[in-house]
Amino acid sequence: METKKVASAVVLQPGEGARRWFFGGGVQTWKATEEDTAGAFLLFEDEMALNKVTPLHTHPDSDETMYILAGEILMNMDGTEHRVAAGGVTIAPRGVPHAFKVTQEGTRVLCLHTPGGAQAFYFGASEPIGADEDGAQVVDFDWIRESGRVNGGIEIIGPPPFPGT
């Protein structure tokens, strides 16, 4: 088994990291990029508003682990719904359809993709913001879909699977 060497040491304090407005809704603070980890993984914190939803999607080339730091989400994993609160974790293996809805104000999630490879999608579906900015506040699923088409990293397979969305 081949192991990859981390490209550089990374030490970030709370609140540090490149901040980006994600057009799926929310502010991402990047903690480790593919460049930092030589492609082994990518890691970001995602601050999301109440009722944010994602379309049903898969990640064809990476496993997505979400650790709930604060708040709660409703996760649809391969057709089954699970409420996941702070301290809980979800793991969507590559190719498994999933979507989630934020069910509590102030929800924050630590998102890990292993291996890296989805970063081009996330960067293509977001824009940089300053430390004190909340971002564009525009949710644009067409932009998300196009970034996935151009950059890979995600396949949108349907609308959000939650009633009333």
Image (cartoon, grey):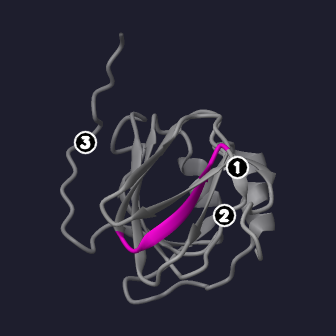
Tag of residue 128: none
Q: In this picture, which residue range is highlighted in magenta?
A: 70-78
Amino acid type assigned to the residue bearing label 1 in the image: His
Of circles 3 and 2, which is in front? 2
Q: Secondary structure at mark 1?
A: strand
Q: Is residue 23 covered in magenta?
A: no
- Circle 3: residue type: Ser
- Horizontal placement of 21 versus 154: left or right? left
Give the residue number, with chain letter if any, for mark 1: 57
Secondary element type, mark 3: loop
Between 52 and 2, the residue placed more toward the observer is 52
- Name the magenta segment's main secondary structure: strand
Q: From what the image shows, is residue 40 above or below residue 74?
A: above
Say which quarter of the image contains residue 29.
bottom left
- Residue in the foreground of this view, choosing between 24 and 91: 91
Q: Which residue is mark 2?
A: 54
Residue 91: image location, x then y, percent: 47, 43
Q: CA distance from mark 1 to mark 2?
A: 8 Å
Identity of the residue drawn at 30% across and 60% down: 87
Task: Please identify the quadrant where the N terminus is shown.
Answer: top left
Where in the figure is residue 60, as x and y percent of width and height? 65, 35
Q: CA distance from mark 1 to mark 3?
A: 32 Å
Residue 11's quadrant in the figure?
Answer: bottom left
Is there a contact, CB below 8 Å, between mark 1 and mark 2? yes
Does label 1 or label 3 sit earlier along the sequence?
3
Q: How many other residues sit within 10 Å of disc 2, few (<14), some (14-19) or many (≥20)?
A: many
N-terminal-most mark, 3 or 2: 3
Q: Residues within 10 Å of mark 3 (few under 14, many from 20)?
A: few
* Type of the residue with mark 2: Thr
Q: Which residue is mark 3?
A: 8
Gap in Å between the C-alphas at discs 3 and 2? 32 Å
